[in-house]
Amino acid sequence: GAVVSQHPSRVICKSGTSVKIECRSLDFQATTMFWYRQFPKQSLMLMATSNEGSKATYEQGVEKDKFLINHASLTLSTLTVTSAHPEDSSFYICSARVGNRGTEAFFGQGTRLTVV
Amino acid sequence: KQEVTQIPAALSVPEGENLVLNCSFTDSAIYNLQWFRQDPGKGLTSLLLIQSSQREQTSGRLNASLDKSSGRSTLYIAASQPGDSATYLCAVKRSNDYKLSFGAGTTVTVRA
């Protein structure tokens, strides 16, 4: 299957600082990538859809000024958590699709963010 | 809004036993359904993808069925092994966009 690489896998930051998470499609081009957040023992919640060359589409309740998404190329999307607070601590996962709507979604390894 | 439910939330079986994991969804207008495996602290690994026109998919010891009209899918894992211990998530894709709706998962423990 297609490979999606996410970096870093773990990050600890201080309150008030910003953290950038990268999501790369290694062997395919992804015009659309997705960012999810997962709380312990809960399902993945879609935060936003990242579109190459245009603005991201955010789900209801997700602060776009806090979670900045940039999709500057067909293989890279970044999520920046700005002015992080302890409540932002979570597991963030990105996903990309190959081809059209009917194809599989492939996921990155996830990033465990801890804000202290 | 699509609601996806997975029952049970957790399951513990002895090695060798067959596993049956259930997934139900409220809106039958789906494009496809995908089963994933997630190990602790890791991302998701795609196991099986079933298109809405299909009734089942098989890969090795894994078999997934889909009954779209009743809003159900079942993942069968034959002859379970300790390495099968993980959380299994199902996700459905809506017909009109790319988005996936996930269940909360079933955490499986296979005892040696």
Image (cartoon, coloured by chain):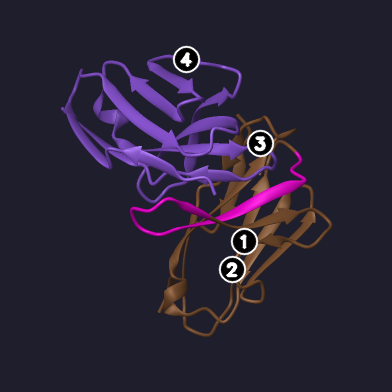
Q: Which residues are magenta?
A: A29-45
Quadrant in which the C terminus of chain A is drawn: bottom left
Asked if the stretch drawn in magenta spans residue A34, the answer is yes
Q: Nearer the viewer, mark 4 or mark 2?
A: 2
Q: Which chain is purple?
A: B
> Which amino acid type is marked by label 1?
Glu
Q: Residues within 10 Å of mark 3 (few under 14, many from 20)?
A: some
Pinpoint the chain carrying mark 2.
Answer: A
Residue linked to disc 1: A59
Please report contact status of discs 1 and 2: CB closer than 8 Å, yes or no: yes
Q: Nearer the viewer, residue B87 or B111?
A: B87
Q: Residue at x 71, y 55 (%)?
A: A50
Residue linked to disc 2: A62
Q: CA distance from mark 3 to mark 2?
A: 23 Å
Local SS, label 2: loop
Q: Quadrant of residue A90?
A: bottom left
> Which amino acid type is marked by label 2?
Val
Q: CA distance from mark 1 to mark 3?
A: 18 Å
Q: CA distance from mark 4 to mark 2?
A: 37 Å
Task: Using the image, tell me which numbered label, if any, was put on residue B95.
Answer: 3
Q: CA distance from mark 1 to mark 4?
A: 34 Å
Spot occupied by residue A44 in the image (x, y as percentages of width and height) = 47, 51
